[in-house]
Image (cartoon, rainbow, N blue to C red):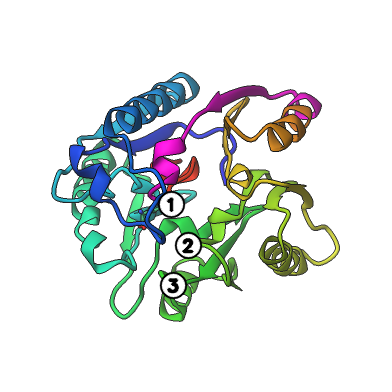
């Protein structure tokens, strides 16, 4: 992960968002106007934290298009267009690719790569920490993607089984190269143990939070963005931010959570 990204890529939340995919039908239906507001605040917060915000407009034909994290991963100067696991979402990548091709004109150091069938990968399954790239083997991402990624990023890719939740990062995220935030649940502990093992003698420290969704945070420069509404986890994260000298910003994501979204899902930082 890059703790001080220059760019944040985001994509608008479409008015068709109420039809977004979800593992379980939410108890309360998605409130569209509130979702739009939450996404707007998210975008504004990121704009405050990076040099350049790249904003792609929403695509009404793709209710999940705001979850732009799934379409591309960027590791240093390599941008790798994924092949999203849900067939109904695969075309979301086209506009993201066009945007990155256009960015390449002014930033030629950026190289573009693509995963090809039979690979399937959602960016939500990719965790970057301490120079390593962990790939969740989930309902959405497969071994072929791990193998193709390992050819693009030699020696850096490690597969992690995801037994619970949608994605690897549904239960964990990186605060910095030394700190992994993890849901305090059996699946969270199991995945963290696999990640720690890959580091050998100098593993990151794992901080376990009681609320699974609160384990998904965004570190952007000197800011730590966390989810509002989970008081026990918020207290722990406030202490962590203070210890690291980071500014804490809280965002409510209640309507995006209903479509299995979280903080990392709605941007690509590079
Ligand atoms: C989906 O099921 O694909 C979307 N409703 C949620 C995607 C969340 N993306 C992410 O965590 N990176």
Residue 165: percent from left, percent from top: 53, 62
Residue at the image position 40 percent from the left and 23 percent from the top: 41
Instruction: Find numbered disc 3 in the image and state the secondary structure of the residue it sits on.
Output: loop
Q: Are marks 3 and 2 in contact (CB under 8 Å)?
A: yes
Count neighbours of disc 2 (C-alpha within 10 A) and say few if under 14, some if 14 to 19, many if 20 or more: many
> Left or right: 49 with respect to 177?
left
Q: Earlier in the sequence, mark 1 or mark 2?
A: 2
Q: Is the shortest distance between ligand 1 and the CB of mark 1 under 8 Å?
A: yes
Front residue of 26 and 138:
26
For image coordinates 73% across by 27% down, the residue present is 238
Among all residues in the image, which is located at the extreme left?
61
Query: Residue 82 vs residue 3: left or right?
Result: left
* Residue 192 on image: x %, y %: 71, 62
Judged by depth in the image, the label closer to the viewer, 1 or 3, is: 1
Q: Ligand 1 sits in which quadrant? A: bottom left
Q: Which residue is mark 3?
A: 139
* In magenta stretch: residue 243: yes
* Element at label 2: loop
Left or right, residue 240 beside residue 28: right
* Depth check, front residue: 36 or 162: 36
Q: Is the residue at mark 2 in contact range of ligand 1, meaning its CB lies under 8 Å from it?
A: yes
Q: Secondary structure at mark 1?
A: loop
Q: CA distance from mark 1 to mark 3?
A: 14 Å
Read off the residue under disc 1.
260
User: Residue at image x 69%, y 52%?
Assistant: 182
- The residues colored magenta run 241-260
Which residue was labeled with disc 2? 166
Percent x, y of residue 173 = 61, 49
């Amino acid at each position: 992960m890059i703790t001080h990204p220059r760019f944040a890529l985001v994509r608008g939340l479409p008015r068709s968002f109420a039809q977004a995919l979800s593992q379980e039908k939410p108890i309360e239906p998605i409130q569209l106007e509130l979702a739009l507001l939450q996404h707007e605040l998210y975008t504004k917060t990121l704009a405050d934290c990076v040099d350049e915000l790249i904003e792609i407009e929403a695509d009404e034909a793709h209710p999940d298009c705001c979850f732009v994290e799934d379409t591309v991963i960027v590791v240093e100067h390599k941008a790798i267009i994924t092949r999203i696991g849900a067939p109904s979402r695969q075309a979301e990548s086209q506009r993201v690719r066009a945007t990155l091709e256009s960015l390449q004109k002014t930033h030629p150091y950026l190289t573009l790569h693509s995963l090809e069938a039979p690979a399937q990968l959602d960016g939500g399954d990719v965790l970057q920490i301490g120079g390593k790239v962990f790939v969740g083997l989930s309902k959405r991402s497969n071994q072929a993607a791990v193998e193709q990624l390992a050819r693009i990023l030699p020696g850096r890719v490690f597969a992690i089984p995801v037994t619970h939740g949608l994605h690897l990062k549904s239960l964990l995220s990186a605060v910095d190269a030394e700190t992994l935030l993890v849901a305090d649940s059996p699946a969270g502990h199991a995945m963290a143990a696999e990640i720690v093992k890959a580091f050998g003698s100098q593993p990151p420290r794992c901080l376990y939070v009681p609320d699974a969704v609160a384990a998904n945070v965004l570190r952007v420069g000197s800011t730590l963005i966390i989810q509002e509404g989970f008081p026990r986890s918020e207290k722990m994260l406030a202490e962590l931010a203070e210890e690291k000298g980071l500014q804490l910003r809280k965002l409510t994501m209640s309507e995006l959570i209903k479509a299995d979204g979280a903080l990392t899902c709605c941007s690509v930082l590079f």
